[in-house]
């Protein structure tokens, strides 16, 4: 198709899409076979270089040479979630496809509803955090009300009241004890307190108070004890016991704290949920910061390096050319790693897919990137691991594979995760690469130190075995429970 044909077709398409173009919801551009800009419609693509300029002159497509080349074979390139302030406030998606008739490319831009939904989700999480804070405050009020209620119970003799002789046999009970045990006073008096409250196999009271030391009688003690009501329900009682010297006996006042312990457990669960939300918000903040600082800086650095290479000219020293080429490749690698880190932070892989799927994806990406065969053996019981252990194992596997890629030069890598009946989990990463002497590790490499520190943070055991010319094996064991 000629340029005249393209210009003849374009107004019709632009006319059909005029409402979307005017609202900034959609834009498109034609890219020639030589990857230069031929035509642009829509303000979402105002940032493209001028007509006739190479598409690669914009930082958005810097470092995507391989993907652009693949488009000639019919591939498709998607770049979701872009935002280019201050020109555009609306986030948008880009789709780049091959146009067989002209041999060129078609570039489409559409407002990114996913990012907008992402921002709405953040607002929703803020509201949820406020709800959790309100619920925690409500739980605090309930605790204070319970304390006031307990004081009222004591004042009205509704607490459990016992009198015990030096031999810890019951000499007095109030009606609250009789109701709790479903026994009459006559059936209670004279019985050992440990038998009455079903303390077996441990005699709680006898171990604490049966003594002939006169000084001990002047002391008071408080403790919690499990007991059973008359209907068989298990409850918890808090006891306050002191020696009544005038009556030569112990007096014990007990309160049912079962509901209080449940409230404490509920408050702890809410606090953990709030902590998890805070961690997720922080990860999202870091992802935004990486995108707005590191990625923007890298994409801005590339044109400067290209300008230096052009300015240096063909007569530039060979060393300068090599260093500039190395710098340009370093920018590409850094941009790729930064984009991968942002994707990992935003995707919440472990929460969405679980540790097993996350490790499989990590191994697959490693194999695609390096061409090294990766053997993965995962235990299905890995899904039961605590979130802290799962996250640590994933980060250790990520660092182990990175070390293998950078230093080991292996032809095979294995990732094994096993969980036994006790819940103990073992992660093994081994390769057949260059290896090294563990007593004299290479200087300047801190990956193994980071793995050891991560393992120690969750109380896991770390073991390293390596032999020059044979390979390296890393083993991390986290206990169950």
Image (tube, rainbow, N blue to C red):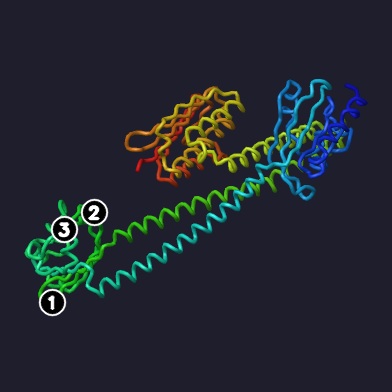
Q: For the residues carrying marks 1 and 2, which lies nearer the camera in this image?
A: 2
Tally the marks: 3
Decide if residue 296 is in sight here: no
In the drawing, what numbered circle is on residue 197? 3
In the drawing, what numbered circle is on residue 479? none
* Residue at the image position 44 percent from the left and 35 percent from the top: 464
Q: Say whether disc 1 or disc 2 marks the residue closer to the N-terminus.
A: 2
Real-space CA distance between mark 2 and mark 3, rounded to the nearest whole angstrom = 11 Å
Q: Are marks 3 and 1 in contact (CB under 8 Å)?
A: no
* Residue at the image position 21 percent from the left and 71 percent from the top: 220
Q: Say whether disc 3 or disc 1 marks the residue closer to the N-terminus.
A: 3
Real-space CA distance between mark 3 and mark 1, rounded to the nearest whole angstrom = 25 Å
* Residue at the image position 51 percent from the left and 29 percent from the top: 435
Q: Quadrant of the C terminus?
A: top left
Between 232 and 57, the one lying in front of the other is 232
In the figure, is residue 244 to the left or right of 22? Answer: left
Label 3: state its secondary structure.
Answer: loop
The residue pinned by badge 2 equals 234
Position of residue 30 relative to residue 219, above or below, is: above
Residue 217 falls in which quadrant of the image? bottom left
The residue pinned by badge 1 equals 245
Label 2: state its secondary structure.
Answer: strand
Real-space CA distance between mark 1 and mark 2, rounded to the nearest whole angstrom = 33 Å
Q: For the residues carrying marks 3 and 1, which lies nearer the camera in this image?
A: 3
In the figure, is residue 450 to the left or right of 423? Answer: right
Residue 103 falls in which quadrant of the image? top right
Where's residue 467, x and y in %?
Answer: 47, 28
């Amino acid at each position: 198709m000629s340029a005249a044909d393209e210009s003849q077709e374009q107004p019709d398409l632009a006319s059909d899409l005029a409402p979307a173009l005017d609202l900034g919801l959609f834009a498109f551009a034609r890219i020639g076979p030589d990857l230069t800009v031929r035509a642009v419609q829509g303000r979402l693509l105002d940032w493209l270089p001028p007509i006739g300029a190479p598409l690669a002159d914009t930082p958005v497509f810097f470092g995507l040479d391989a993907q652009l080349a693949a488009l000639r074979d019919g591939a498709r390139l998607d770049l979701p979630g872009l935002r280019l302030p201050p020109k555009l406030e609306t986030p948008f998606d880009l789709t780049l496809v091959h146009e067989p008739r002209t041999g060129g490319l078609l570039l489409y831009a559409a407002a990114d509803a996913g990012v907008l939904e992402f921002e709405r989700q953040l607002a929703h999480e803020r509201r949820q955090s406020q709800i959790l804070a309100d619920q925690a405050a409500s739980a605090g009020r309930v605790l204070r009300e319970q304390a006031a209620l307990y004081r009222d119970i004591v004042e009205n003799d509704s607490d459990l009241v016992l009198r015990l002789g030096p031999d810890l046999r019951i000499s007095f009970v109030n009606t609250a004890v009789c109701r709790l045990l479903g026994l009459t006073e006559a059936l209670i008096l004279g019985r050992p307190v440990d038998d009455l409250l079903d303390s077996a196999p441990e005699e709680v009271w006898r171990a604490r108070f049966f003594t002939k030391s006169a000084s001990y009688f002047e002391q008071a003690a408080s403790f919690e004890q499990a007991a059973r009501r008359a209907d068989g329900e298990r409850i918890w009682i808090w006891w306050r016991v002191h020696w009544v010297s005038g009556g030569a006996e112990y007096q014990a006042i007990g309160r049912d704290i079962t509901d209080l312990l449940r409230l404490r457990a509920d408050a702890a669960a809410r606090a953990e949920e709030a902590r998890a939300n805070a961690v997720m918000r922080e990860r999202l903040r870091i992802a935004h910061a990486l995108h707005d600082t590191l990625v923007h800086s890298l994409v801005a650095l590339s044109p400067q390096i290209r300008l230096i290479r052009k300015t240096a000219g063909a007569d530039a020293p060979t060393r300068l050319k090599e260093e500039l080429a190395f710098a340009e490749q370093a920018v590409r690698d850094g941009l790729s790693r930064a984009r991968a880190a942002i994707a990992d932070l935003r995707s919440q892989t472990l929460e969405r897919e679980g540790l097993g799927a996350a490790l499989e994806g990590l191994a697959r990406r490693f194999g695609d990137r390096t061409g090294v065969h990766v053997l993965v053996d995962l235990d299905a019981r890995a899904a039961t691991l605590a979130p802290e252990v799962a996250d640590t194992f994933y980060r250790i596997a990520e660092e182990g594979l990175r070390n293998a890629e950078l230093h080991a030069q292996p032809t095979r890598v294995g990732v094994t995760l096993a969980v036994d009946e006790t819940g103990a989990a073992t992660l093994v990463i081994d390769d057949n690469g260059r290896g090294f002497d563990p007593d004299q590790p290479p200087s300047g490499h801190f990956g193994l130190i980071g793995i050891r520190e991560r393992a120690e943070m969750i109380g896991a055991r770390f073991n390293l075995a390596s032999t020059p010319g044979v390979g390296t094996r890393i083993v991390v064991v986290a206990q169950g429970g």
